[in-house]
Amino acid sequence: MWALRRVVGVRAVTAGAVIAAAVLASAGCAKFDAAMGQQQLVVGFRAGTSQNAMMQARAACSNIPDSAPEPMPTGANATTGTYDIRFNVASASDADIARLEQCLSRFKSVEGVNVEQEGGD
């Protein structure tokens, strides 16, 4: 009888450890998924591109589903345009991102695009 209690006790402890590990893993996955969901598409422009040209590209490509342009920073220099144009693509599909990239590529002033995690990671 003692051996049976010992086996049952070990199984219960093992099952508890497995459940605890699963809960911790799912919490970690949720944080990872939340971080992954904070994607931005950053548009790089050629040197000397005017703010007007940047804003034209931003406006022309702002109608792609699930890829809204982010608000302009409040501290942006209105005369030099020394800031990035960013689109929030957190909920955009790969096809939506491809459409956005294709739209932006029509502008000669666009040097390239980069999909980043929020914070530049």
Image (cartoon, rainbow, N blue to C red):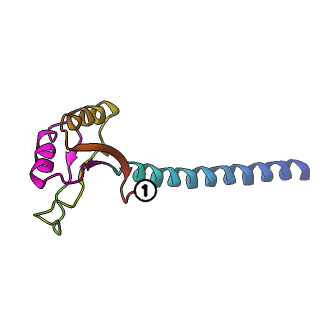
Left or right of residue 23, residue 62 in this image: left
Residue at image position (17%, 51%) is: 49
Horizontal and vertical percent for residue 104? 21, 38
Horizontal and vertical percent for residue 76? 17, 65
Horizontal and vertical percent for residue 93? 32, 34
**Number of numbered discs overlaid on the protein picture:** 1
Q: Which residues are magenta?
A: 41-70
Residue at image position (20%, 34%) is: 103
The vertical placement of 105 against 20, above or below, is above
Residue hosting label 1? 121
Left or right of residue 51, residue 20 in this image: right
- Residue furthest out toward the front: 48
Left or right of residue 104, residue 117 in this image: right
- Residue furthest out toward the bottom: 75
Determine the secondary structure under disc 1.
loop
Q: Quadrant of the C terminus?
A: bottom left
Which is more toward the observer, 38 or 87?
87
Residue at image position (19%, 34%) is: 106
Residue at image position (14%, 38%) is: 63
Horizontal and vertical percent for residue 60? 12, 39
Q: Is residue 59 magenta?
A: yes
Q: Amino acid at mark 1?
A: Asp
Left or right of residue 113, residue 80 in this image: left
The vertical placement of 37 against 61, above or below, is below
Q: Quadrant of residue 91?
A: top left
Which is more toward the observer, 12 or 85?
85
Mark 1 crowdedness (10 Å alpha carbons): few <14, some 14-19, many ≥20: few
Q: Is residue 88 magenta?
A: no
